[in-house]
Image (spheres, helix red, strand yellow):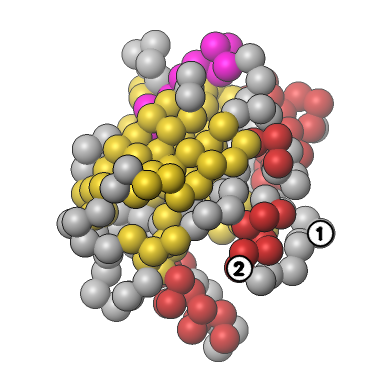
Amino acid sequence: MRTARLRSGRHFPIGKILCIGRNYADHIKELGNPAPEAPVIFIKPASSVIGEGEAIVIPPYSHDCHHEAELALLIGRTGKDIPAARAMDHIAGYGVGIDLTLRDVQGELKKKGLPWEIAKGFDTACPLSDFEEASNVADPQNLQIRLTVNGEVRQDGNTSMMIHRIPAIISHMSGSFTLEPGDVILTGTPAGVGRIVSGDELAADIPGVAALRVSVA
């Protein structure tokens, strides 16, 4: 069983991984997508998580796997229909995650009007760091998110650029899903996403919060 680890030593078995798409205007523009009125939600299974130093395995049915670095929220308190004004009370910690996307597979399935879980939830599709205690992060809405591939900067954005901000994301998601301790929320990615291939080394970093390094098998 995969667990989410806080630097204080607390552990949570990872539950559901709720992800928001199209939450940075520059990323929406680079993919040529329309801006959504409400958060776009999809889910990754806990079995998709890998940690520091582990390897991404791109499935043989894809030839276009993309990285998407994101601020990750670790839920520490159960809640349903959470008001935005109380949403931050449900966060146990903050980390960095990489939402891996099989862009070719996703595109083909979208064209056919079919679900695209296999493009987002495959094994190793969610590299995830340890988490910093929420009380130690002064302003989660002003954090720099960086990702490098083989030392080259690919993504460098700030959580202040989110369209839907953290309290609104938690409130909206809890309207459909009861949030439970160990659930993880990925809050969207800034621009700069791109393809990764075998042998690549990825480093995702939110200074002062979390860092993560993984490779591609």
The x, y position of residue 22, in whole percent, is 65, 57
Work out whether residue 80 or residue 120 is closer to the camera in this orientation and state it.
120
State the count of labels. Answer: 2
Q: Earlier in the sequence, mark 2 or mark 1?
A: 2
Secondary structure of the residue carrying tag 2 is helix
Quarter location, residue 87: top right
Work out whether residue 113 or residue 36 is closer to the camera in this orientation and state it.
36
Q: Amino acid at mark 2?
A: Leu
Q: Residues within 10 Å of mark 2 (few under 14, many from 20)?
A: few
Q: Residue at x 51, y 78 (%)?
A: 107
16 in the magenta segment: no
Task: Give the quarter of the figure containing the C terminus.
Answer: bottom left
Query: Would residue 66 be found to the left or right of residue 91 on screen?
Result: left
Which residue position holds label 2? 31
The x, y position of residue 119, in whole percent, is 42, 68
Q: Residues within 10 Å of mark 1 (few under 14, many from 20)?
A: few
Which region is colored magenta?
A: 128-137
The x, y position of residue 77, in whole percent, is 58, 25
Which residue position holds label 1? 37
Work out whether residue 6 or residue 28 is closer to the camera in this orientation and state it.
28
Q: Residue at x 19, y 56 (%)?
A: 199
Q: Residue at x 61, y 68 (%)?
A: 31
